[in-house]
Amino acid sequence: MSELIDALESSDGGKYLRPRLVAAAFLGMGGTDLDILGEVAGAQQLLHIGLCLHDDLLDGDRMRHGTANLIARVTDVGLASGLAADVAERQAMAAGLLAGDLALNAAIRALLSVPALDHVRQRLATETTSALERTIAGELIDVRSEVIPPVQAEPLRVAELKTAGYSVALPLRMGAIAAGVTSESVLDGLHRIGIAFGIAYQLVDDDLGLFGSAAHTGKSVLSDVQRGKRTEHIREAYSRAGAPDRAVLDRLLGFGDATENDVEAVREIVVRTGARDSVRETVDKHLEHGIRLAHAGLPAALAGHLTRLALTLRERTR
């Protein structure tokens, strides 16, 4: 077990967006007990680590934050010790699954031991498990969409369930609850703000997955095409494209051996059909909606902070 814990600790990293959002909401809503803040923010990062580990398993990814992820590292150790390739792979998959489970369990345990009143601890844990259920639903829709026609996919719904809910809406609500907020209207407002910003965040992430630089994103630009991921870029391009372009997309999406040239062909169709511009307009629409909600219902300092954070999404490179 100690080896698994060490492997889990080495998987931490990234932008720490979720704990930062917890802190923003906690402080913006008048929270003062930094011990409570530390536990809740840490639990959100653990939740994120666990979901990332499971996501890497589902996606077949071997990179995270620009370096080999836990699965790749365990595979390499197994191969170096003399294990057959299939045995090393199975050991790595098991390590990734169990480490993810361990992180999710640690997140809930941390929330149940937060130095706060019993009803606050209970609410924090319930909020997290409810968000986890929605994330699982989004992940399931996302995986199943890889085998359906792109025009039938629902990438915005996936973004709402899988990313926006746990990455933005949940941390904002958790910070507010930890600060003592009990008003359901305020918490609902934070949820709607989080969903708007979170969908924009995912759409920009998808854009980087297709058009970004692996050196900046830490992720191969081949993986989404090789998996046949039904992003909003792909759904829009497919719905706008003529028969020849659709035939190209049908041939390349989900082709596990797709090359950089193949991905460039997909990029060209996405741009030429106007799909990329359409997605950018959708990003702006969600950002503007979230900013309006923030300034209409949140303390000025918190609304200003979230606005500044949201506007940086347009220029993300990683």
Image (cartoon, rainbow, N blue to C red):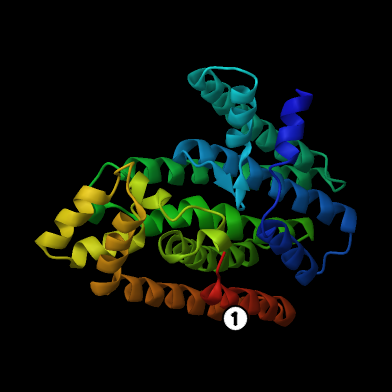
- From the image, which quarter does the C terminus lie in? bottom right
- From the image, which quarter does the N terminus lie in? top right
Q: Which residue appears at 77% of the width and 56% of the height? A: 178
Vertical side of 36 occupied by 195: above or below: below
94 or 105: which is nearer to us?
Answer: 94
| Residue furthest left as drawn | 243
- Label 1 sits on a secondary structure element that is helix
Q: Quadrant of residue 284?
A: bottom left
- Where in the figure is residue 18, as x and y percent of width and height? 67, 57
Residue matched to label 1:
296
The answer to whether residue 106 of the structure is visible from this angle is yes
- Where in the figure is residue 297, as x and y percent of width and height? 62, 76
The residue type indicated by label 1 comes to: Ala
Vertical side of 38 occupied by 87: above or below: above
- Where in the figure is residue 53, as x and y percent of width and height? 59, 39
- Where in the figure is residue 37, as x and y percent of width and height? 82, 56
The answer to whether residue 182 of the structure is visible from this angle is no
Q: Quadrant of residue 243?
A: bottom left
189 or 139: which is nearer to us?
Answer: 139
273 or 251: which is nearer to us?
Answer: 251
Q: Which residue appears at 20% of the width and 63% of the height? A: 239
Q: Which residue appears at 85% of the width and 48% of the height? A: 116
**Left/right of residue 137 with respect to residue 274 in the rendered view:** right
**Left/right of residue 178 with respect to residue 290 in the rendered view:** right
Vertical side of 246 occupied by 120: above or below: above
Q: Which residue appears at 31% of the width and 57% of the height? A: 261
**Left/right of residue 84 with respect to residue 125 in the rendered view:** left
Q: Quadrant of residue 29?
A: bottom right
How many circles with numbers are drawn on the protein? Answer: 1
Vertical side of 290 occupied by 36: above or below: above
